[in-house]
Image (cartoon, helix red, strand yellow):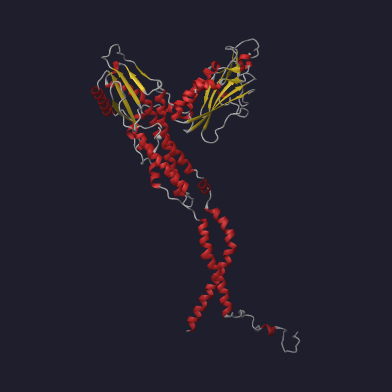
Amino acid sequence: MDPIPTDDGGGVPGVEGLGLRGSGNTKPTPPTESPRTLLTRRTIVLSFWTIVLCLGLPHWLWTTSTYRASLPLSTMNDWAEGKACDLRFAFPIHLRVLGWTREEMVDLGGNLSVLLGHDGSDGLLDFTFHVGNAVEEPPLPAHRDPALTVVLNAADLPDTYEVASRLEPGESTLRLGSGMSQAGEILDQIRKITAPQQEALAYLLSGTPFAATEHEALQMTRNMRSEASLDARNTRAFKPSTTYHLSFSLFVSGNEPSAWAIEDALAAYVTPLLSALSGVSKFTVTTQVQLHASFSPSIAGPTFDEASREWKLRKEDLSGFVNAAEWPLSPSIGEGSTINFVLYVPAPGHSPLVVADTGGTGWLVPQWGGVAILNLDGPTTQPKPAIDTDLATLTITDLDEIILTFADQLTALIGLPSSPAGSLALRIAALQRERATALLLSTASTLGALSRLVHKLPNIPIPDTVATSVGTSLRHLDLACQDLGVGRYAKTDTNLGALGNAQAASEASEKAFFEPSMVGQVYFPDEHKVAVYVPLLGPMGVPLVLAGVKELLGLYRGMREKVKGT
């Protein structure tokens, strides 16, 4: 059907007015923009990009940049690899011979040094001998502390000839009888005293990078040490700490005794020990009493032995004897470790209560504390009478053996060597050397781990506090190494000593490694950044990029047309 003509002569209404051509194969062209409109649009796009590049991008880089303080990574790696310190343990010995002249004592000291040099028996300890006169202490350099004093009675003194040797309990002094005046005999006694210390130091160094620098001495010492005993001592003891919290608890099955003379007992037996150990760590003491304390439900309970008329605990039940769910024991929270000592008084119907295998009434829980049982009633076939009024309070006489047991357990839990048995001073000095060495090794390992972490994660922030802590740790490590080499182990008024510097270095390295701002970035991979930035920048960036590309292409076409026109 033909279209109906209109007054304007068009075939289809409005077709001519739209400006469309009869052919459908030609694409429509957009109207030509005026130069003013083109300039306005390009100015808008350029303004957006100017703001993004000149203001947004620098601000984003500034707010998201990772600040990394400079760290002495090479020095940290040297310590981790055992290259920064040649570990030597000076062992200066005072030598006094009653009745000898100074010249004779100098000759004896020279003979001892020659014997050590010939057989190389000094091992990890660097022995040096210093002599004075018969009544005065030998002079030592101001920076050295005596590790051992050897006092020998001369054979020409009347009624002094003896062969026995003994150690002074409260001093680092070895007294020898006049029958041991030969250099070889004196040296044998010194080796006997220092052999356990050599073994312990070799045990600490074995398997560490520092063992390479002491390979010859270490191999010689390892042949005479007992791996089993050192492993057992290391397993029992707490981790070295500057502070220990001692908690003494009385748990009673019934309602009596309800008090104990713990302050007097501690003052008599524990306080002197803590005073002697004050150069190693600080100690705080708390006490408590808990009535109606029941056994832990995790154990089967004691069984009655008809033959011995005793209640016996199986060895398997010792580890679960403490009722941690109901007994208010102090946990190790905060600075320092808590060492618990528990005294349990069983009910009259379960007394006497002993350990089945040994018949003892006390045992040690590794890295936790000690437990002791106080039986107030002996075995009887008659019903148990009520506790006398006198037993409502445990006196110091009732507690003396228990507190002595706790004191012995305390020495094991802090890692105090058991030998030489005759001198507590020598044992504490050995513990100071071991603690300083262990802390130095652990600090070097921590610094090495921090160096590897910084190298592996280039985007992790390093605040100035970390650099400060690392510098402090390295400074104290150098001082600890120097103190070990000159024999300055204990803390003095003017110097921290090897142990004090090692403790300060360990604390600073732990503070640097566990910096909160660094720990959070360790677990923040790049995928998290993509997940944050794509939803934020995608909707804003795509239009800007497309508009910019479009204008650049239009500018390129215009320049090309001008070139062709010319």
Residue 349 in view here? yes
Q: Is residue 545 above or below residue 21?
A: above
Residue 415 in view here? no
Q: Is residue 151 above or below residue 278?
A: above
Quarter-wise, where is residue 486 in the image?
top left
What residue is rendered at 50% in x and 20% in y?
268
Relative depth, front residue between 401 and 238: 401
State the image coordinates of residue 246 (x, y, percent, origin top left).
53, 28
Q: Is residue 560 above or below residue 369?
A: below
What residue is rendered at 44% in x and 36% in y?
503
Relative depth, front residue between 566 and 9: 566
Q: Is residue 286 left or right of residue 449?
A: right
Q: Is residue 543 left or right of residue 472?
A: right
State the image coordinates of residue 361 (x, y, percent, origin top left).
54, 19
Quarter-wise, where is residue 485 in the image?
top left
State the image coordinates of residue 48 (x, y, percent, origin top left).
56, 68
Relative depth, front residue between 151 and 349: 151
Q: Is residue 281 left or right of residue 187?
A: right
Relative depth, front residue between 62 and 263: 263
Quadrant occupied by the N terminus: bottom right
What residue is rendered at 51% in x and 59% in y?
61
Q: Is residue 42 above or below residue 369?
A: below
State the image coordinates of residue 149 (x, y, percent, origin top left).
34, 24
Q: Tell me how many marks there are.
A: 0
